C-alpha cells in the first residue's frame, strides 16, 4: 500500500507538472503570437514610415528641382533685364544723337542762309539808309514820353514791317530750328578698380571745320567749359564713342555718387547755357544708371563698341 500511495502521489505530481507546463507553453505561445503580431504591426508601421520617407524624399527632390529651375529662370530673367536695360540706354543715346544731328543740320542751314542773305543786303547801296530808318522808327515807337497819333503809329508800324521784310537779317535775331533739342544725360559710378563718376550724352559729331554755325560744337565745348569751371581744370577731357560724349572723372576722396551728381550738374548746366546762347530751345532729362549697367555700357578706358 505504501508503494501504491507513493506511485499515485508521484503520478499526480507528474500530471500536475505536465498541466503546468502545458499552461506555461500555451502562455508562451500566446506571448509569442502577441509578439509576432506586435512585430508585424511594427513592420507595417516601419513600412508605412519608409513609404512616407520615400514620398518625402521625392517631394524634397522635386522641390529642389523646382528651386533650381526657379533660380535658373531668375538668373535668366535678371540677365535679360540687364541686357534690355543696356540696350535701352544705348538706344536712347543713339536716338538723341540722331535727333541732335538733324537739328544741327537745320541750325547750320538756317545760319548759313541767314549769313548769305546778310552779306547780300550789306552789299546793297541803300541798305544803310533803310537800317537808319528802321532804327529811327523803333525809337519813335518805343518812346513812351512822346505821344504819337494813332494814324501816325499805324503808318510807322506799316513802314517798319516793310523795312523788316527787306532787311530782316540785319535787324532781327538769327533764325533757329523749330524743333527742341532734347537729350538724356545718364550718370552713374564705375566701381571696377578705382571708383569714378561718369556722365554721357548723345551728341552728333562736330562738322569739319567747326564754327559758329556748328551747334554740336557749341554744345560740346559749352558743356566742357562748364565742367572745367565748376569742377576744376584738372578734369579729364570728354571722349567720344560713336557720337556719345562721355565724361569720366576719378572720385578721389569724395563719395563716388556725389562726384557723379556734381559732374552731371556741371554738364547739364553747360549744355543749357550753350543751347540758350545759340537760341535753341533745350530740354534735358537726367537718368541715374545702376553701376552694373553703366559698366556694361561704358567700359573703363573707352573700349570700342557700337551704340
Image: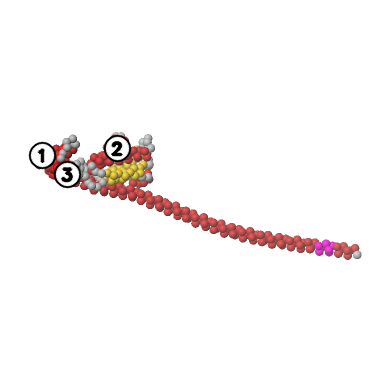
Q: Is residue 120 magenta-colored?
A: no
* SS for dot 3: helix
Q: Residue at x 86, y 62 (%)?
A: 9
Label 1, on which residue? 129
- Closer to the camera, 48 or 197? 197
Around disc 2, counting alpha carbons within 10 Å, would you say few (fewer than 14), some (14 to 19), or many (20 or more)?
many
Residue 199 percent across, percent down from the top left? 32, 42
Q: CA distance from mark 2 to mark 1?
A: 46 Å
Direction from residue 123 to residue 239 in the image, left or right: right
* SS for dot 1: helix
**Would residue 84 be visible to someone looking at this image?**
yes
Say whether disc 1 or disc 3 marks the residue closer to the N-terminus.
3
Label 3, on which residue? 114
Label 2, on which residue? 227
Bounds of the magenta span? 10-16
Direction from residue 105 to residue 47 in the image, left or right: right
Residue found at the very far left of the displayed protein: 125
**Would residue 135 be visible to someone looking at this image?**
no
Q: Residue at x 17, y 44 (%)?
A: 114
Say whether disc 3 or disc 2 marks the residue closer to the N-terminus.
3
Residue 200 percent across, percent down from the top left? 31, 43
Q: Quadrant of the N terminus?
A: bottom right
- Closer to the camera, 156 or 11? 156
Amino acid at each position: 500500500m505504501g508503494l501504491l500511495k507513493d506511485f499515485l502521489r508521484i503520478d499526480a505530481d507528474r500530471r500536475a507538472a505536465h498541466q503546468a507546463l502545458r499552461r506555461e507553453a500555451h502562455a508562451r505561445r500566446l506571448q509569442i503570437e502577441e509578439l509576432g503580431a506586435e512585430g508585424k504591426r511594427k513592420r507595417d508601421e516601419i513600412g508605412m514610415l519608409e513609404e512616407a520617407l520615400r514620398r518625402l524624399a521625392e517631394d524634397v527632390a522635386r522641390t529642389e528641382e523646382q528651386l533650381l529651375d526657379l533660380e535658373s529662370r531668375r538668373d535668366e530673367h535678371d540677365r535679360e533685364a540687364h541686357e534690355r536695360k543696356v540696350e535701352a540706354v544705348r538706344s536712347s543715346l543713339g536716338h538723341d544723337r540722331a535727333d541732335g544731328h538733324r537739328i544741327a543740320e537745320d541750325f547750320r542751314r538756317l545760319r548759313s542762309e541767314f549769313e548769305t542773305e546778310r552779306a547780300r543786303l550789306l552789299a546793297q547801296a541803300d541798305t544803310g539808309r533803310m537800317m537808319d530808318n528802321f532804327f529811327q522808327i523803333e525809337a519813335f515807337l518805343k518812346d513812351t514820353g512822346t505821344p504819337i497819333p494813332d494814324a501816325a503809329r499805324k503808318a510807322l508800324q506799316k513802314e517798319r514791317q516793310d523795312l523788316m521784310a527787306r532787311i530782316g537779317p540785319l535787324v532781327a535775331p538769327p533764325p533757329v530750328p523749330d524743333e527742341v533739342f532734347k537729350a538724356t544725360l545718364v550718370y552713374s559710378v564705375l566701381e571696377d578698380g578705382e571708383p569714378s563718376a561718369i556722365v554721357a550724352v548723345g551728341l552728333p559729331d562736330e562738322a569739319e571745320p567747326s564754327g559758329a554755325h556748328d551747334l554740336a560744337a557749341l554744345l560740346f565745348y559749352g558743356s566742357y567749359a562748364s565742367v572745367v569751371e565748376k569742377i576744376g581744370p584738372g578734369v579729364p577731357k570728354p571722349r567720344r564713342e560713336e557720337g556719345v560724349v562721355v565724361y569720366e572723372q576719378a572720385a578721389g576722396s569724395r563719395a563716388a555718387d556725389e562726384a557723379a551728381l556734381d559732374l552731371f550738374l556741371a554738364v547739364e548746366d553747360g549744355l543749357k547755357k550753350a543751347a540758350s546762347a545759340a537760341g535753341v530751345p533745350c530740354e534735358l532729362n537726367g537718368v541715374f544708371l545702376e553701376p552694373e549697367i553703366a559698366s556694361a555700357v561704358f567700359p573703363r578706358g573707352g573700349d570700342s563698341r557700337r551704340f
